[in-house]
Amino acid sequence: MINSISKAFARLNVKVLVLVCLSAIIPTIIISVVIDITYLNRSIQSECENLYTKSEVLSKQIITSGYLDDQSDVTMETRLDELAQLIDGRVILVTSSLRVVYDSYSLVKGKIFLWENVTKSAAGEELAHYDSEGGIITTTIPVTVYEEGSDETKVVGVLLASGTYTYIKDNLDHLIAIEAILLLMITVLSIVVGSIVGSSFSLPIREASKQFDRGIKGDEIGEIDATGYEEIEGLSHRFNTYVSKMETIDKSRQEFVSNVSHELKTPLASMKVLADSLVGMGDAPIELYQEFMNDITNEIDRETGIIEDLLAMVRMDKSGVSLNIKTVNINELTEQILKRLRPIAEKAQIELVLESFRPINAEVDEVKLSLAISNLIENGIKYNNPGGYVHISLNSDHQYFYIKVEDSGMGIPKESLDMIFERFYRVDKSHSREIGGTGLGLAITHMAVIMHNGEIMVDSIVDEGTTFDVRIPLTHIEGERS
């Protein structure tokens, strides 16, 4: 039971519902209490002031008539009776020695009246007391006279007036009943509003959970559509973007598996055909054997290149992979790369041009940076036209060094520029298959540059060429990589 309640309160829509209800109910209760207290205090204060006024007028008449010394004045006694009837209560007059000289109830006349408020009023204080049970207000005021030859007064008696004001309690009870009905209405309304708001918040999350469950089962994941709240719309947009990206990656991976399977099978199939041919030749000329062995070697190199790309991607994709940082002469590194790639470029009739503006020494991982630069230049050679060029330029400032690789090749369509660094993505799949490769080169390059806290940008025009701009800090600071 407790676990069920805990699980229920752990849900977002229930928390929102409770929050909305509390936000509505608690202020309503506080306002109701403040109104009740204010009404009660104002009503009591008003009736007390009324009693004070009547008692003060009567106290002056008591002094004038000398009633405290001689109770034979029937007129004064009548006035005291009228006050008792007017307030529907009791009036008591005591002397300064606390002896009762008048009691409208005729219960304590002639006796000593000991009550805290009467005692304090005999010392000069005006006091009031409210009995909430019976709705009775009791005021006590001192009856004073001026001392002979002085401006000071002295207390000669105390006038107690106790009236019944049940209307205050009745009105307060009526007010509380109205507030209770209002609180009930607000509670119901807040539950309805809280349920609607809570559902609107949790609906996209529940929908996303359903879609994730579909994905776990292997079914197609759909988009969610939620509007009304900026945060929820943002969540929905990000989820849909994620789904779209995952679908793209999944599709790319399927294509990658197909491409890699083809690329791996083709060299193997070629080698098998060549090997079978050699086995069936018998006494073939040695030149023919050499030719077949060269072809097998080329197919082995092709297979090795594919596997190396895959392994490089896996190694660089591992979380927490470290860089082997050391100071490297970027000019010499680039020249070594060009020396290795120049035979490939000459075979494809592509001119390689290196332009170095100044000597550059930087703190980098030589292997990973070499792989990145090699991929850019090799792509420029592969996707170029006979008689074209690949221009490489090196430059630096006080903080970064810059590598620009510009080619005169087939270019990249504008709609593909944002995706070329995604793994498994290939712009022209049919042409890329003819050229070879796995579609991992630019992904590896991008990852290597990011690992160096650098940036890579691309600009391309179809049938005119492509330019890659790489910027990497001269000094490597560990921990900056995002």
Image (cartoon, rainbow, N blue to C red):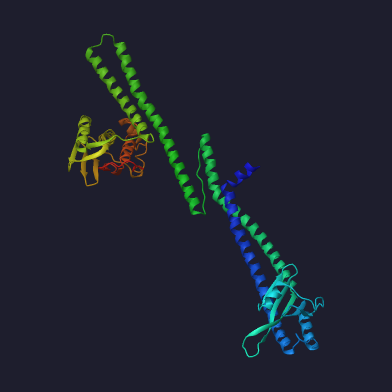
Closest to the observer, 271 or 104:
104
Residue 46, x across and y down, in percent:
67, 76
Closest to the observer, 80 or 393:
80
Q: Give left or right: position of 347 versus 138.
A: left
**Residue located at (30% from left, 31% from top):** 435
Q: Give left or right: position of 267 versus 236.
A: left
Q: Residue furthest top?
A: 283
Residue 419 visible at all: yes
Q: Give left or right: position of 74 versus 279.
A: right
Q: Residue furthest bottom?
A: 149
Residue 349 visible at all: no
Q: Is residue 370 above or below residue 18?
A: above
Q: Give left or right: position of 119 versus 255.
A: right
Residue 158, x across and y down, in percent:
71, 80
Quarter-wise, where is residue 269 in the image? top left
Residue 132, x across and y down, in percent:
72, 68
Residue 349, x across and y down, in percent:
20, 33
Quarter of the figure with the N terminus: top right
**Residue located at (43% from left, 41% from top):** 245
Quarter of the figure with the C terminus: top left
**Residue located at (72% from left, 66% from top):** 173
Q: Is residue 290 above or below residue 92?
A: above
**Residue located at (51% from left, 39% from top):** 212
Quarter-wise, where is residue 343 in the image? top left
Label total for image? 0
Q: Is residue 389 above or below residue 139?
A: above
Quarter-wise, where is residue 451 in the image? top left
